[in-house]
Image: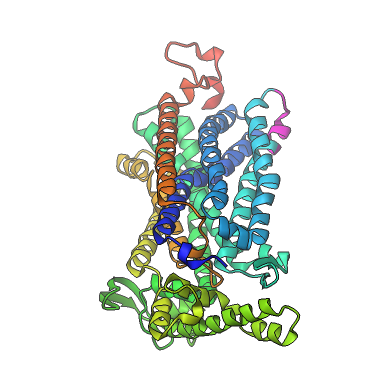
Amino acid sequence: MIDPPLIDLHVVDLSRLQFAVTALYHFLFVPLTLGLALIMAIMESVYVMTGRVIWRQMTRFWGVLFGINFAMGVATGITMEFQFGTNWAYYSHYVGDIFGAPLAIEGLMAFFLESTLVGLFFFGWDRLSTLQHLAVTWLTALGANLSALWILIANGWMQNPVGARFNFETMRMEVTDFAAVVFNPVAQSKFVHTVSAGYVTGSVFVLAISAYYLLRGRNQAFARRSMAVAASFGLASALSVVVLGDESGYTASADQKMKVAAIEAEWETQPAPASFTLFGFPDRDTQQTTAALRIPWALGLIATRSLDGEVAGIRELVARNRQRIENGIAAHAALQAVRADRTNLVKQQAFQALADDLGYGLLTLRYVDDPAKADAAIIDRAAWDTVPNVPVLFWSFRVMVGLGFFFIALFATAFYLSATRRLDSPRFLRIAMWSLPLPWVAAELGWVVAEYGRQPWAIDGVLPTFLGVSSRSAGEVTLSLLGFVVLYTTLAVVDVFLLRRTIKAGPDGLGYWPRKGQDPATSHSALTD
């Protein structure tokens, strides 16, 4: 294991901050890529089925915006994977056999596929047949989703490390069942929830830009059709996010009980079925939630889908973790005995009996250089370290869920107005336009809940975060962090500038519609309305 005196907790915090910053920047681009890719495929399918040129031009216009965003996503995503080697070297050494496989498959199967198909999408309009180009567009959307799938399989394993075991010979985690890693229920629920959130982001984006055009009385046919697609696809996606979010919460209640308890600020275990705290002010110092507004039975029904299932509170879970830490300390001692006498089967069996709790014993290395030196006070501190920041998770989750229900209302209204041909309400169009940043807020808060809620674990129950860092100085990490902030901020500004310029130019600015004074007979305008 890492020599504990070499652990600089300041470096740990800086490394965590750097990865959080780069991940949050990267996820500014990912959901829009997921959403626009499928919306483009839907629009081009309508073009192929109807032969109406306006749908082709819609596909090409939104495709330009997709291309800008895709390029920025690639630029910000590649550097993230390198951080596992530069900032989290011991993490990569300890679990690289498992974590690295989905990332490698993502690069070979999804990223290269998607990148190739994006080129065919842009340059194949006049070189491929109509059906061939449609196939390329759908495969581009598939590639984007496959990329998300393998990334979330890797991330899901961090949340629920199945299909692997610790090898005392190599002192690393190794795969025992790759199928279990791939079909990890946490990974699968995270995947469908995340891609649905991406579809919502793409739909809000199309809805907001279309509302912008309608408010200015330009590109009316384009905007109305785009809004109709965004409204219907977005409504289905927003409803899916809520349903799949419930599934994600259900899997978390089985595998990450502390995260669920922190999200709900449930300090004490309630009689089943537990009530859901709709509103309140959790306080970590007093371990109470004041001014709490509760919905009876709701938490029990959501978390256990039953009337008699218990949802454990934070204090009870801390007590359980305290016992697991004591077992982990014994496991660490048994590991040392096995490594001193590797052929002794009795010692091997003694270690295997406690191996599942080894990671909990490693939590004490934050305070002592040998788990065997941990006294009752240190064990108690380590047990309370397993509680994430309750107020942050409590409010992040509620804002995210509130935005989810807002999107349902927004898309339902847009769908009704589109179906009744009443998309001329300035009030609704303004609400739609100013809703543009909200799906990104919801998506980023979702990652805060998922990742911050996993702390103090890099791999839940297996490897504490503070043990995964590289042997870097605080100055080196600070310098690279500042470099990333400057670079990524520049890329974000460039992305917004290019998107804004393209949107202001509109389809006519890209040559898809006639400019003022241009003879309509020489353009596609006669076919667009």
Residue 388's x, y, as percent?
A: 40, 69
* Residue at image coords 41%, 26%: 501
* Residue at image coords 64%, 52%: 103
Pick the residue in front: 514 or 50: 514
Q: Secondary structure of the magenta portion, mostly?
A: helix
**Vertically, is 182 above or below 495?**
below
Quadrant housing the N terminus: bottom right
Q: Quadrant of residue 169?
A: bottom right
Q: Is residue 126 visible?
A: yes
Q: Quadrant of residue 135?
A: top right
Q: Is residue 49 visible?
A: no
**Vertically, is 203 above or below 280?**
above
Residue 415's x, y, as percent?
A: 45, 48
How many numbered marks, from 0 up?
Answer: 0
Q: Is residue 134 magenta?
A: yes
Magenta span covers which residues? 127-135
Pick the residue in front: 172 or 434: 172
Residue 364's x, y, as percent?
A: 46, 75
Pick the residue in front: 199 or 432: 199
* Residue at image coords 57%, 33%: 59
Which residue, as the protein is rendered here, is positioned at the far front? 340
Q: Is residue 280 left or right of residue 501?
A: left
Residue 148's x, y, as percent?
A: 59, 51
Pick the residue in front: 441 or 243: 441
